[in-house]
């Protein structure tokens, strides 16, 4: 089933909007990709956790997203998958690597291969999915090597998912803007 991609800047309201889009009264499988690195990240995760209905399922995903999601969908009869978010997934992968591996072809291929697998799986899944990600193109170039590696890799991941999404929304200050498809935009 085609999926929806929701992007926006940090604290733009994209996660809250995606949660509403998934539907508070539906059986939602919430796929969390964030890792607790410090107290601030714990507070961010708690904010998301406290905002979700207790009836939603939770899948805490690691670097492999496709297989755990496929396994969960085979068993539990979920109505919607909400994955929040692709940007913390990419950052977790990079943070678990030594600096010299951040910009290697091997790392890039590893991440893009998993992203392709997930996008292909979601296209064939009978369960609708809402994916959340940060838009990396709204700010300046990061000041650190890790920040630049993250921006570049996430930018590719976002474009990959946006190319196959049925709908893409950019959320700014809590307000969604539906982006046109490439075919409908006049871009060739």
Image (cartoon, rainbow, N blue to C red):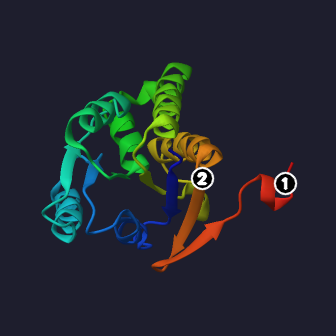
The reply, left or right, for residue 73 in relation to residue 141 is left
Q: Earlier in the sequence, mark 2 or mark 1?
A: 2
Q: Furthest-left residue in view?
A: 54
Q: Nearer the viewer, residue 20 or 105?
A: 20
Could you classify mark 1 by the number of other residues whose Cα lies within 10 Å: few (under 14), some (14-19), or many (20 or more)?
A: few
Q: How many marks?
A: 2
Q: Is residue 8 above or below residue 141?
A: below
Could you classify mark 2 by the number of other residues whose Cα lies within 10 Å: few (under 14), some (14-19), or many (20 or more)?
A: some
Q: Furthest-top residue in view?
A: 106
Residue at the (79%, 59%) spot, across then down: 184
The quadrant where residue 10 appears: bottom left
Residue at the (21%, 35%) spot, across then down: 75
Which one is in front in this view, the residue at disc 2 or the one at disc 1? Answer: 2
Expressed as whole percent of the image width and height from the top left, the position of residue 132 reads 43, 56
Residue 36 can be seen, yes or no: no
Q: Which of the labelled discs sits on residue 187, or is there none?
A: 1
Q: Which of the labelled discs sits on residue 12, or is there none?
A: none
Expressed as whole percent of the image width and height from the top left, the position of residue 32 reads 27, 49
Identify the residue under disc 2: 166
The reply, left or right, for residue 166 in relation to residue 185 is left
Q: Nearer the viewer, residue 53 or 147?
A: 53
How far apart marks 2 and 1 lie (CA) works out to 17 Å
Q: Nearer the viewer, residue 37 or 62?
A: 62
């Amino acid at each position: 089933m085609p999926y929806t991609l929701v992007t926006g800047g940090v604290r733009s309201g994209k996660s809250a909007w995606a949660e509403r889009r998934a539907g508070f009264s539906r059986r939602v499988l919430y796929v969390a990709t964030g890792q607790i690195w410090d107290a601030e990240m714990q507070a961010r995760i708690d904010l998301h956790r406290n905002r979700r209905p207790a009836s939603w399922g939770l899948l805490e995903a690691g670097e492999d997203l496709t297989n755990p999601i496929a396994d969960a969908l085979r068993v539990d009869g979920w109505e919607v998958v909400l994955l929040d978010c692709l940007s913390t997934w990419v950052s977790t992968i990079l943070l678990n690597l030594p600096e010299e591996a951040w910009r290697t072809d091997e790392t890039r291929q590893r991440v893009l291969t998993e992203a392709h697998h997930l996008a292909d799986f979601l296209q064939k899944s009978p369960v609708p999915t809402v994916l959340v990600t940060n838009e990396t193109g709204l700010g300046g170039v990061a000041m650190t090597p890790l920040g630049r590696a993250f921006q570049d890799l996430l930018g590719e991941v976002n474009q990959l998912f946006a190319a196959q999404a049925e709908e893409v929304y950019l959320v700014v200050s809590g307000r969604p803007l539906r982006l046109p498809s490439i075919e409908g935009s006049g871009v060739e």
